[in-house]
Image (cartoon, helix red, strand yellow):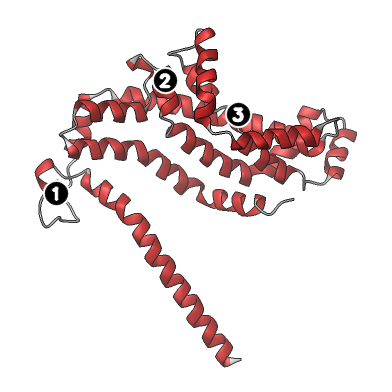
Amino acid sequence: MASRRTSKVVLYTLAYALLIIFAFIMLMPFVWMLLSTFKDQRELFEFPPKFLPKKLSLNNYIEVFKTVPFVRYYLNSLLVTFTSVVLNLFSSSLAGFAFAKYRFRGREIIFKVILGAMMIPFPVTIIPLYIMVYDLGLVDSYFALIMTGSVSIFGTFLMRQFIVNIPDDLLDAARIDGSSEFGTYVRIILPNLRAPLSALAVFSFMSTWNAFLWPLLVVNDDSHRTVQLGVQFFTQRYGDLIHLQITAAAMAIIPIIVLYLFLQRQFIQGITMTGLKG
């Protein structure tokens, strides 16, 4: 018994040591980037390079905000991302509810066809999607930016995998009490989807916030540019100012890191609970 406990302790110690090493390797580039936002151009190219800045200064951030309208880009990205995430959570949970709990002709075939569409890469559909948006006169509008992130095949699959394990008796009891179908969805389904909805919210936020190709096609006006387009625009105009480019890139990544720090428990719980559902 003592030898088994000793071997387990050694095994767990090695496992945690490896995890700490890999975590350190993964986090170092982000930490270096964040610290570099407080360095000027000269300090950034010093050799040998110094990990910590000589003095913490917000001059780079102030300069970026003065050079390009990053506040406008942030507001655009927040509006587009927040609206897309809310619509995605609503449409995915509602579609997942339908596929999990309703019996209708062709349900399995339709669901498999939808899942098959996940294998079609987005660049294949981008031309017909742009033609449709152009014909509707929606180019250079918030709607064109929001529509592509408002539905998700992966989100529908994720919600369906979880909802299918909610007991039917619970739904039947709500219907007997006089609850409508939408009321059952709101009162029974949604409260039981907090973990997977949090995971989907993180995925959807990252996808919409980091979107570049589609906004680049449908946005021509500076007033509709998102953060990612703002970083690209800033890089083109000020390609020699490396310290400001790093600062602009960090400003585009920070919201994702903050969101994950707040939702990491729900995110991990949602992935582990939905990944094994049948």
Q: Which residue is mark 1?
A: 55
- Badge number at residue 151: 3
Q: Position of residue 130 (x, y in %)?
A: 50, 17
Q: Secondary structure at mark 1?
A: loop
Between circles 1 and 2, the one closer to the viewer is: 2
Q: Amino acid at mark 1?
A: Lys
Q: Position of residue 26 (x, y in %)?
A: 37, 56
214 or 183, nearer to the observer? 214
Q: Amino acid at mark 2?
A: Leu
- Residue at the spot x=24%, y=24% of the render? 68
Residue shown at 53% from the left, 28% from the top: 124
Q: In the rendered structure, which disc, 2 or 3, sits on the residue that comes first in sequence? A: 3
Q: CA distance from mark 1 to mark 3?
A: 46 Å
- Is 61 on the left-hand or right-hand side of 259? left
Badge 3 density bin: few <14, some 14–19, many ≥20, Cα 10 Å = many
Q: Earlier in the sequence, mark 1 or mark 3?
A: 1
* Farthest-out residue, bottom: 2
Q: Amino acid at mark 3?
A: Val
Please say if the residues under marks 1 and 3 sit with CB atoms less than 8 Å apart. Answer: no
149 lies above or below 218: below
Mark closer to the chain start, 1 or 2: 1
Q: Which residue is mark 2?
A: 217
